[in-house]
Image: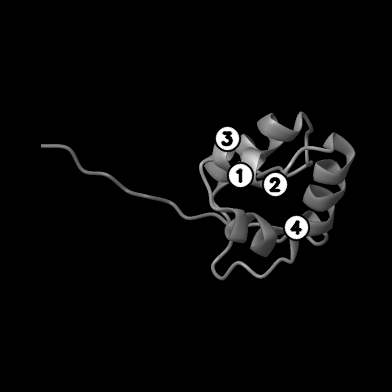
Amino acid sequence: MKVRRIIKLEVDVPGLGDRIKQAREARGRPVTQMAKEVGISRNYWYQLEAEAVLGGVAEETLRKIEEVLGVDLGVQFDD
């Protein structure tokens, strides 16, 4: 039998929403299109930019946003 331990690690990243917004505006692509590529709703994208997401954003979602925007948002975990 397998036993799994899930470790939850969160880091506070001040200004992340602004960085996402600036990168989006620099790309000049519609939010709806980018959100679809990431797999999130347009409303959720705007919540991320406003830093209004309760409980934080999943790292997997953040990495997809970076991929779609073609940027490194500088979020690191000290593993």
The Cα–Cα distance between marks 1 and 4, rounded to whole angstroms, is: 21 Å
The label number, if any, that marks residue 35 in the structure image: 1
- Return the residue at label 4: 13
Horizontally, is 77 left or right of 28 in the view? left
Q: Amino acid at mark 4?
A: Val
Tag 4 or tag 1, which sits nearer the N-term?
4
- Residue 78 occupies quadrant: top right
- Return the residue at label 3: 37
Density class for disc 1 (Cα within 10 Å; few <14, some 14-19, many ≥20) is: some
Q: Which dot, 2 or 4, sits closer to the camera?
A: 2
Tag 3 or tag 4, which sits nearer the N-term?
4
Q: Position of residue 68 (x, y in %)?
A: 68, 32
Tag 4 or tag 2, which sits nearer the N-term?
4
Residue at point 58% right, 62% down?
56
Residue at point 43% right, 51% down?
7
Q: Amino acid at mark 3?
A: Glu
